[in-house]
Structure formats: C-alpha cells, structure tokens
C-alpha cells in the first residue's frame, strides 16, 4: 500500500502558525488582533500555505498569553469580537484555505466559571472538576501532596485558603488542571471547547499538551535532582498517564470523527517512536499527527536551567528527523509534523543556522529547504518565512522579555547562580538563545516605525531592531529574498508532492556532523537534498543510491560548485526525467 493511496487534505497541507498578539494590529492599540489577521490573509495565501493555525484568542486574563482560558466561546476583548472571528473563518475559507484553532483543555484559567464554582466550597457540584487534594503534614508543617515542580516554577500544588485544600496546576498558578477522570468534565469540554467550534466550520485543532490529561493519581514524589529546592522536575509523570489513550479515543469518537477535520496534538516528553505511534496510527483513532519536542530540545542542556548548548550535534538532528519521518511510511499508516519554530521556541536561524549578517539569508533558506522537503505536515511560524532572528543580545532580558516562563527562569537563575558571575552570564546567554520571547516580538511587515505592525507608538512587546533589514515589504520586492525562496519551495513541494510529501526518506552519511544529505524517493523518481549546516565550505558526494542523471531543481546560491557546498548552501537535485509533476510550477 503506497501512502498516496490514502491522500488526506491535511497530509498535503502546510500550516502557517499565527500568534495573535504579534501578527498585525488593526486598531492602533499596540496589540495584534483578529481583524489584523483578516487583513493579511492574501499575504498568507500568496505564501503558498493552505492551513492557518491561530494561537489562543479566547477570553483570558492573559497570565500565559491566552493559554489560560476563561471562556472557550468568547474572545479576548482586545483581540476583537465573536463577529471578527466568524469573519476570519469566512475570509480564510473564501481564499481556499483552512483554519484551525488552539484547543487548551488540560487546564483552564482560574477565572473560568468552572473553577470559580469548583473553589467555592468543598461541597460545590463542580468541586470534582479540578484536582483537589488535602495537605500532607510533615514535622507538624503543612506541605503539598508531592514534590513536583510546575513548568513555570514552584510547586504544582497551590494552597486554597478558604477551602483548605491544594489544587493541581502543571503550569502557572492561574492555570488549574481539569479533572479528566470525571466523565461530566470530558463531556463539557467536548461540547463547549471542541464541537462548538467545529460546528462553526473550524477545520480542526492544534491541541495543547494533549498527553497530560490523564494523571498518575497516586502522585508519587519525583526523584530529587536539585536538593537546594523542594520542587523537582517530574517530566516522566506530567505526561502519558494510565488513561490517556482511552481519553483520546473518546475525544476522537465524540468530536473529530464526526467532521472532516485535522487534529494535531502537542506531545511533550515522548521521545520514543514506539510511544508516539499509538497517538497517530490511523487505526487507533486518536489524533492525525503530533508535535514532538526532540528537535526543539536538542540545543538545551540538562539540569535545572537547561542551559543552551552551542555544541548540539547534527547527527542527532538527523536521527530525530529520521525517527519522525518513519511515522509517515505506508506500513505505519500514520503521519508526522515537521517544524523548527513556534511560539515556545527561539528563532531557528539563530539556533540552527547563523544570524550573522553574512549568513542570515543563506541559512534561513537552508533551513527552509529542510522544512519543506520532508514528509509530514510542515508548520511555518509567522516571520520564519522572512528569516526573522532572535532579539538583539544588547536587550536587557529582565526588562524586554515578557514571558512568565522567562521571568521564572531568571528568578531560578539568580537563586542558583548567587554570586557566581560566570554562571549568571551563561544563564543570561542561554535566555538570549532560547527564551520563548524571541518568537513573540511583533511581525516585521515593513520598515516604517514599529515595522508596520501598528500605528501605535508603544507596542505590547518591543519590535526587534532588525526590522529595517528584515521585513515583508522589502522581501516582496526582492526575488532573492527568504520570502521568495519559501514561495518557490512551497510550489515545488506541491508540484513534486509524490516525492516531497509522500516519498520515502533515505538518510545518507548519518554521522557527518557538517552536512545533511537525504534522498526522497517515489517509484523510479528521486530527489537529493544537500544541506550545509556550517559556515565553511564542505565537500559532498552524490550518494550511489541516487538514480538517474541529477538535475538541479533549486539552490540557495546563484552558482553551484561541483564537489563543494558553500557555507549554509542548500541544493535539491531530482533525476532528469522525473515524472512526478502533478501541476505546473
Ligand atoms: O506548551 C507546553 C510545553 O510543554 C512547552 O512547550 C512549554 O513552553 C514549556 O513547558 C515551558 O516550560 C504549551 C503551549 O504551547 C505554551 O505556550 C503554554 O505556555 C503551555 O502549553 C501551557 O498551556
């Protein structure tokens, strides 16, 4: 069975991810909004993507930029109205694209009516909608039920004075975890957060922290790795609890199976292929694909601070890629995603390429070549198509970075480093490389003040100084821009879809730490992708497994040398008589 015998619109999709706060401000208040997104739909369509994913725009007190939802059916007022959302759905469909929303149902905001009711009293009919537990008493003192550290610092348990119990929150204190054990909760989630939007014509969801719903109800203590604090990382307990797959099958049955929609689950702490397959195999009827974290974590070190590692290894980058690509082979009847950036990650050019002026454009195009020639559904994050880079290192992390995760990180860094200046410097450098804030600066539309993002003087987050050089308007005019390269690559991806979308993946030289070489194959046709991940010239050979006479399809340099790849060079060859053309370029 060839994979193309099971074509699905979402297999042939490229997703463009939008962060509402920073995409486009339409009313001059310095914050992006829904009408702003609507005003840029032509730009998105012209890029050549066919699905947009909008990060949370729902009513929320915004402790975690909308991942703390107070009402699944209402809109955060500064982003617009429900009518604006309807118009966005209609405008996207009118342009032949699909639209997916963010589904955040592991937790709600503490301001959600469900939680307000739940915390009212121990007898509340909704008490059991969240995870409440009594205190433990150790040496006469009240302590939380266990020692897990929340993703944003401190304990995962918050003491609630009026009702004298703790509630669970894997993320911020303002993000209490729902109790998925309770079938009434699950029903309410399906009706109000999922099917409500699917009935309105939304084409699916990116599903936040999808593998955290089922908890290990005995809440065992995590191993102590940092004796200087009571709160220990509990990665192995946050995710993949005993009833998870049962819950996901139920959600599929009650929600997704009733519509022609896509489900993309965010799946942290699940590195092994054999653990991923059950989520995405068609026959399991759970999810269509998941977002894995292995590549995104590749340049993070271990330890409490997970300091940035300049010495990340390309052989691991390749192995992780190969592991995900295997999901897309016909035998597995499953699918995967490919991404290098999102709203939780720093800019890929700064991490995996080079943002030095002489290499920035080149390496952005090289990474684009990686992203758009693989099987699986690629996710392009706003600004990635322009080669946007991290915030300048001259910016003060404690002043300009806004994310609660970074605030927690800096607090931890100062606690751990104490007077150790070297440690402090290393930690700050790490934030400058990896903080979630880097992807959250306003989109750079043009070279006018505040990058054409807003007419306001003040933006909710400072515009990256690079906007005079890196912006959409300039790149629209420049045939050799990163934007132009993305557009061309996306056309080629569809023209040769049997190769790039459905073709098999064959990695060459897995141990080469400088270049990445792979073949995408479909029957007699094949494409050869050559990527130089370094700032130096690198030799290359055409693998003997490449069939036919190689013809250059695209490259990120005007001329190609015979046996050498220039710094950050990317090339794609196909066999001269490739027959996979499905429509004109
Ligand atoms: O992220 C979940 C997640 O596991 C990480 O990517 C997160 O950034 C990290 O744990 C922080 O330490 C999702 C969303 O993408 C993220 O923006 C939210 O903050 C989080 O869930 C909570 O909803």
Image: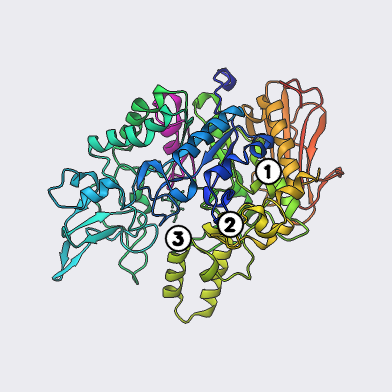
Residue at the location (46% across, 76% down)? 417
Find out whether the residues at labels 1 and 3 contact each other: C-beta distance under 8 Å: no
- Give the numbered dot on residue 441: 2
Residue 339 appears left or right of 229:
right
Distance, label 1 to label 3, CA atoms, is 28 Å
Distance, label 2 to label 3, CA atoms, is 15 Å
Q: Position of residue 167 (x, y in %)?
A: 24, 54
Q: Is residue 561 above or below residue 86?
A: below
Q: Is residue 12 visible?
A: no
Distance, label 1 to label 2, CA atoms, is 21 Å
Residue 288 located within the stretch drawn in magenta: yes
Residue at the location (57% across, 71% down)? 396
Q: Quadrant of the C terminus?
A: top right
- Residue at image mark 1: 368
Residue 435 located within the stretch drawn in magenta: no
Q: Position of residue 81 (x, y in %)?
A: 46, 42
Q: Is residue 71 above or below residue 201?
A: below
**Of marks 2 and 3, which one's residue comes earlier in the chain?**
3
Q: Is residue 576 visible?
A: yes
- Residue at image mark 3: 405
The yes-or-no answer for disc 3 within 8 Å of ligand 1 is yes
Taking depth in this image into account, of 456 and 64 the one nearest to the observer is: 456
> Bounds of the magenta span?
265-292
Find out whether the residues at labels 2 and 3 contact each other: C-beta distance under 8 Å: no
């Amino acid at each position: 069975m060839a994979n193309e015998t099971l074509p699905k619109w979402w297999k042939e999709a490229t997703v463009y991810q939008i962060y509402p706060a920073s995409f486009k401000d339409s009313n001059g208040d310095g914050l992006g909004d829904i009408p702003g997104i609507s005003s840029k739909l032509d730009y998105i369509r012209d890029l050549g993507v066919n699905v947009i994913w909008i990060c949370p725009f729902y009513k929320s007190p915004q402790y975690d930029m909308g991942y703390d939802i107070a009402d699944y059916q209402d809109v955060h007022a500064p982003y617009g109205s429900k009518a604006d959302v309807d118009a966005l759905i209609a405008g996207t469909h009118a342009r032949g694209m699909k639209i997916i929303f963010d589904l955040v149902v592991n937790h709600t905001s503490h301001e959600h009516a469900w939680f307000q009711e739940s915390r009212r009293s121990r007898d509340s009919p909704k008490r059991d909608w969240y995870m409440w537990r009594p205190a433990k008493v150790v040496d006469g003192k009240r302590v939380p039920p266990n020692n897990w550290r929340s993703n944003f610092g401190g304990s995962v348990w918050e003491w609630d004075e009026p009702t004298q119990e703790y509630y669970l929150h894997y993320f911020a204190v303002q993000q209490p975890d729902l109790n998925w054990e309770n079938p009434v909760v699950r029903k309410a989630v399906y009706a109000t957060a999922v099917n409500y939007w699917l009935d309105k014509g939304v084409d699916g969801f990116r599903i936040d922290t999808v593998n955290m719903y089922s908890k290990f109800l005995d809440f065992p203590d995590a191993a102590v790795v940092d004796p200087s604090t009571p709160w220990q990382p509990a990665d192995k307990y946050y995710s993949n609890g005993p009833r998870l797959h049962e819950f996901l099958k139920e959600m599929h049955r009650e929600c997704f199976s009733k519509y022609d929609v896509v489900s993309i689950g965010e799946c942290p702490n699940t590195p092994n292929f054999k653990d991923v397959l059950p989520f995405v195999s068609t026959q399991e009827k759970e999810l269509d694909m998941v977002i894995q974290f292995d590549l995104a974590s590749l340049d993070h070190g271990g330890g409490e601070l997970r300091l940035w590692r300049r010495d990340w290894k390309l052989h691991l980058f390749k192995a992780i890629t190969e592991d995900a690509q295997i999901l897309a082979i016909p035998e597995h009847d499953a699918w995967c995603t490919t991404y290098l950036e999102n709203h939780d990650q720093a800019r890929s050019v700064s991490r995996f390429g080079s943002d030095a002026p002489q290499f920035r454009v080149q390496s952005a195009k090289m990474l684009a070549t990686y992203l758009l020639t693989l099987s699986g559904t690629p996710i392009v994050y706003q600004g990635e198509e322009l080669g946007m880079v991290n915030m300048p290192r001259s910016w003060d992390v404690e002043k300009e970075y806004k994310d609660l995760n970074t605030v927690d990180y800096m607090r931890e860094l100062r606690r751990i480093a104490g007077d150790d200046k070297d440690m402090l410097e290393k930690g700050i450098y790490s934030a400058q490389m990896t903080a979630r804030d880097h992807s959250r600066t306003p989109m750079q539309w043009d070279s006018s003040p505040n990058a054409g993002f807003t007419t306001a003087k003040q933006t909710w987050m400072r515009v990256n100084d690079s906007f005079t050089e890196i912006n959409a308007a300039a790149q629209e005019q420049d045939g050799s821009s990163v934007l132009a390269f993305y557009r061309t690559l996306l056309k080629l991806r569809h023209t040769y879809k049997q190769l790039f979308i459905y073709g098999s993946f064959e990695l060459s030289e897995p141990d080469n730490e400088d270049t990445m070489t792979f073949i995408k194959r479909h029957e007699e046709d094949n494409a050869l992708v050559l990527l130089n991940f370094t700032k130096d010239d690198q030799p290359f050979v055409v693998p003997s497994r490449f069939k036919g006479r190689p013809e250059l399809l695209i490259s990120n340099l005007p001329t190609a040398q015979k046996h050498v790849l220039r710094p950050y060079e990317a090339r794609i060859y196909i066999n001269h008589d490739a027959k996979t053309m499905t429509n004109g370029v």
